[in-house]
Image (spheres, rainbow, N blue to C red):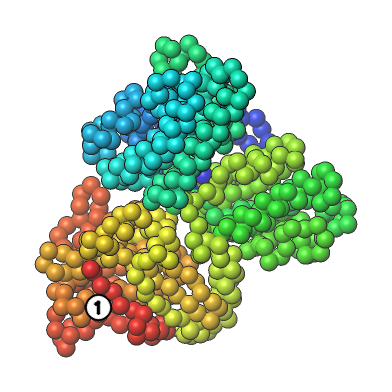
Amino acid sequence: MSVDTTARAAGSPAPASPGTAAPANPVRRLREMARAGLPEDPAPVRELLRQATDRQGAIDLEAAGGLLAAPARRERLAASGALTEQRVAVLGSSTLDSLTPLLTAVLVRDGMLPEIRQAGFNQWRLEILSGAPAFAGFAPRLTLCLLDDAAVFDEIGDPLDAEAVERRCAVFPAELAAWAGRARETLGGLIVLCTLPLSPLRRDRLVSYAARARLDAAWQRMNAEISALAEALPATVVLSHEALAQRAAGPVFGAGRMRHLAAHVYSPDYLLAVAEELSRLGRADLGRAAKCLVLDLDNTLWGGVLGDDGVGGLRLGGGYPGSAHRELQQLARDYQAQGVLLAVASKNDEDRAREAIATHPEMVLRPESFVAVHAHWDPKPGSVRRLAADLNLGVDAMVFVDDNKVERGLMRSELPQAATVELPADPADYATHLAARGDFLTLRLTEEDRDRTELYRARAARAELAGSATDLTAYLAALDSELTVEPAGPLNTGRIVQLFGKTNQFNLTGLRYGEQELGRRTADGGGAFFGARLTDTFGDNGLIAALCLAEEPDGAWAVENFVLSCRVFARGVEDALLALVLRAARAAGAPAVTGRFVPSPKNTRFAGFYAGQGFAQVGEAEPETGATAWRRPLTDPQTDPLPGVPGWIRVPDDKGAFHVR
C-alpha cells in the first residue's frame, strides 16, 4: 500500500498502461534509477519493488535492498517524507546478513523507511544479557529473534540420547520466555519470536522410525509451548516456521556449502518469507493495516457475467468453478467478522447487481455485508476514491480485488496508493492467494474492530441526518450525543493502544504507546491513560479518543498525547475532552495545563487546536521538527472562566473525570 503519488517526479518512470507489460527486469531498472539518482517521490521505486516481488526471486530482491540501503539513497528516501520510519533489531543463532537487504526492499515497497541493526553472529543470548550494547540508543519498534535448531542441540552432549533431547526441548520454551522478557526490558517495542524448524540432518541421522517419531513429538511439544508465549507474554508475537515455509518459494534450509563456509543456515527464499512477515508486522505496529476490501462482482465474487447470463446463470456454489467463487465470499465474510469493511466496485447496472446480491441462493455475502455497493459504468479508480472519502479512510487503506487485468492495471496507474491484488489465473486459487497476502493483519482484535461494519452503517445514518438538518447546530443537537471518559483497564487497554498506534489525522504529538509501557507507567504513577466513548441516537461509536496525561515538576498537568478517531470529527468531541481536562486540573489545584503539537503530513489541520482553546505558545517552534509547546494557566475561576463542553454533548457527572496519577 503506497502513499498518494498524484504528482510524479520529473524523470521517474510512469506506471505501465492498463493491460501492458511491466518492465522486463525491475531490478535492472531500479539499478539504473539508483545510478541516476532516486526520484523525489518514492512511488516509482516502490512500484519496481512490487514488480520484483511478483516476478523475481529472493536474490534479486536482496540486490534491490542492498542498493536502497546505501546511506545516500536512504537519505533520499527519507527526504521525501512519504515513508514512515520503522526500526528493526535482528538477533539470531546463524548468519542473517542477507535478511537486512531483503527486509529493506520489502519495507520500502510497503511504505516504510527501514532502519535495521543486527547483533553479531550467534550473539542472541549474550547481547541481551549484557544490556544490548549493539543497540544502544536505537529503540527498535520490532526486535526479531530468529533461531535454528542449533540453539537447542548445542546444549545436548549426545544427539542420539532421546531422554536428553526431550529434557532440553522441555526447558527451552521457558529459557526463551525469560530471554524475551529481558529483551523487552532492555529494548522495548515488540518482541518477535519464531518456532524452530528441525533440519533434515538432525532427524535423518536417526536410523529407527521409533526414534524419529520420538524426536518429532518432543520437537512439536516444544514448538507448541513457544507458540503459546504469544498469549502468555506481553508485547510478544510468535511466527510459525511452518507457515513461513509454506510461503517460501524454495526450501527452508540453504545450500550445505554456505552453511559450512559462512554459517548460512536458512535459504534466501525462507529469509524473504521472514522479511515479508516482518513487513506485515511493521504495518500492523504502525496502525497501517488495510481496512476495506473492495470486490468486483463478475467472475470474481461469482462466475459469469450478470449482464449476459442473468441471475440464474451465475456460477456460484455447487461444483467448480462456482465453489471457488463461494470460497472467496466465505473468506470475505470471515474478514468482515474481524472488522474488515466490504464494498463492491463493479461495472454493472446497480439495480441488477443489488438484485443478484440479495436473491441468489448461493450468495454468502448479502446486502448487509457491504458498507457500499458501487455498480455503474464509470472507471473503478473513481469508485475507490469515493469509497475512501465516504468512509473517511485513506486510499492506502483499500485493497482492490478484480479478475480483470485491464481493471487492475488501471487501478495501479490511477491509484498506486491502493493495494491491487494480482489474482492468479485460476479462481480455485483466489481465496488462498488473497488470504496469504496478510493485508488486514493486526496485532490484536478489539470489540470495535468486530463491530466496525455496524459502526460505519450508523455513520451513514448520521450522514443522512446531516443532509436533512437545516443547520449544523440542529444536526448536532439531534444526534443526542453522550460522552464518557474511562481510565485504561483490562477491558479497554487494547483499543487505547490501538488508537494511539493507528490514529494519524488528530494525533497531536505522534507518541505511541505499547501495552507494556502503558501498564508500567500507570502502575508507577508516571502517566495516566484514558479512553473516551461517544454514543448517540444511532448507537455506540465505540472508544473514539485516547489521552495520556502526566504531571510536570511544577505540578502542571501535561497532555502528553491526545488522539481522536476521524469518524467523530466536527462534532466538538476534542473541545469537550480538553474542557474536561482543564476542569479536572483546576479542581486538583494544578497551576496550568500544558501540551505539545508535533506537525506531521496528516495532522496539519489541527495545528491551531491549542490556540483555539486559550493556550499560549511557549517559545519558538523547534527548528528540526516544527514542534510547538503550549500552556494554559489555571488562575482564579472568577476572572478566568474555562471553556465549557459544547451544549450538544452530555457528560454524565460520574463519567468525565481525569487525573494524572
| Depth order, front residue of 187/9 | 187
Q: Say if residue 270 shows up in the picture.
A: no
Look at the picture and state if 370 lies above or below 196: below
Left/right of residue 120 with respect to residue 470 in the rendered view: left
Task: Say above or below: 27 vs 333.
Answer: above
Of the pair 72 and 161, the residue shown nearer to us: 161
Query: Residue 648: x, y in percent?
Result: 42, 84
Front residue of this view, candidates 383 and 365: 365
Residue 338, located in which quarter of the rendered image? bottom right
The answer to whether residue 55 is above or below residue 18 is above
Residue 514 image position (x, y, % from top left): 35, 53
The C terminus - image quarter: bottom left
Residue at the image point whose x is 56% and y is 59% from the top: 339
Toward the bottom, the furthest residue is: 638
Confirm whether residue 576 shows in the render.
yes
Residue at x 28% of width, y 30% of height: 126
Name the residue rendered at 40%, 84% in the picture: 650
- Label 1, on which residue? 584
**Residue 367: image location, x then y, percent:** 71, 65
Q: Secondary structure at mark 1?
A: helix
Q: Position of residue 594 (x, y in %)?
A: 20, 67
Q: Observer-nearest residue: 480 or 119?
A: 119
Crowding near pointer 1: few (<14 within 10 Å), some, many (20+)? some
